[in-house]
Amino acid sequence: MVEWYDWFVYSSFAIYFAASFFPEGNDTAKLLNTAAIFAVGFFMRPLGGWLLGRYADRKGRKAALTLTVTLMSASALLIAIAPTYEAVGYFGALVLVVARLLQGISVGGEYAASATYLTEATPRGRRGFASSFQYVSMTAGQLVGLGLQIILQNTMSAEALHSYGWRIPFIVGAAAAAVVFYLRRNLLETEAYDEEERESEQGRGTIKALLAHKKEALLVIALTMGGTVAYYTYTTYLTKYLSNSAGLPKETATLVSFCALFIFMCLQPLAGGLSDRIGRRPLLITFGIGSMLGTVPLMTALGGVQGFGGALVLSLIGLIIVTGYTSINAVVKAELFPTNVRALGVALPYAIANALFGGTAEYVALWFKDSGIESGFFWYVSGCAAVSLVVYLTMRETRDVALSRTEQATQEAVPTRV
């Protein structure tokens, strides 16, 4: 939760600190600049995915999870103390870039290490349910950030928030990450990793080993493409869209996002548990069809919404559709690879897809708006979902895959479900 709080709070508070790091100009241009720096973090995720994915496969899931939160704590502290444009010119923006680079490396490894840990630590038949808590914690991180934003909005003036109040969430994040570092040091390693470590170290977490699974790596990129664009559209970009395009007050837009995300968070375990019963593909296909056909009308309607109620209902529809992807995407990716390259296999392809599509979603949306063709972004999201839908329709089911030799022996002894 803390890791993802630190990652997402940048976007949540961008509407308040954008003016602090860039010269005077129109609001959309300032948001474009901060969105570009937000995207920079995503472009470091492949590097983080490679370095920390390899580290997780060679040194263990626990070691990787401890390292990622250390990097995140340092980056949050950097943002908290970054000087403004008025004080040092563009140097403050450079500090933001460095902080986002560190965050990108951290999250590039965090996603894979946590997805792998959750999947390996859970018995077959419960993996979908257990791994869904990755997006529960991710969303909880966003909710904590939005909740803090709502508190600050109601206890501080707009001038104070724009001046110095936006630094508070980053100070909180840096301190909380230091606590998580202690907690993660006491994690137990997974049985699947311990079993692999006893066998051999050769080839674990290497690009050569990953290239032996090129099809699975390409599959991760393709199945992530539509999901990550839709997810960031209905989460991090939603508040800006409701404020900057629909014209809702910032406070109302933030409250809509908070309420919608809370319900979305509660849906994840339900959908994850459902996938343990009916399989992963039905949920992914439902998401693909819903996102491909529903994005344009939903976003168009959200652009003309008048108040809290309508905005909440429409946002929830979008997030319910996205649940078909978010609740199980981690377990699906982990189930595609063997133990010796599982963390790297999840991390690197996923990070590449996020850099190309997830991290740029907000920037692409604002670019279309700045160009006067905002609806073009809605079609872009639908197109990405259509590509992923083709993958969902043709991929194999992964629900009953054995993740360790012990599990495989048990599976051979007991017939699998049909």
Image (cartoon, rainbow, N blue to C red):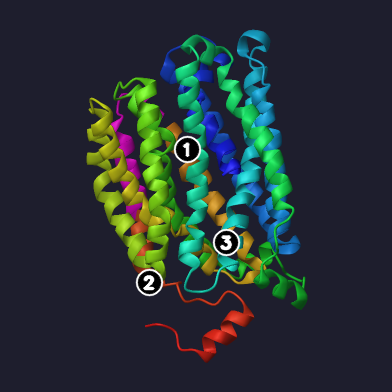
Q: Which residue is mark 1?
A: 143
Residue 374 sits in quarter: top left
At label 2, counting other C-alpha atoms closer than 10 Å, the crowd grade (few under 14, some 14-19, many 20 or more) is few
For marks 3 and 2, give the CA distance.
18 Å
**Magenta span dominant secondary structure:** helix
Q: Which residue is mark 2?
A: 277
Query: Camera-side residue: 86 or 131?
Result: 131
Q: Which residue is mark 3?
A: 118
**Magenta-drawn stretch contains 378:** yes
Quadrant of the drawing holding the N terminus: top right
**Horizontal and vertical percent position of residue 188:** 70, 62
The answer, for residue 89, to whether it is visible in the render is yes
Q: Is residue 408 left or right of residue 153?
A: right
Going by the numbered disc 3, the residue's amino acid type is: Leu
Quadrant of the drawing holding the C terminus: bottom left
Mark 3 or mark 1, which is nearer the start of the sequence? Answer: 3
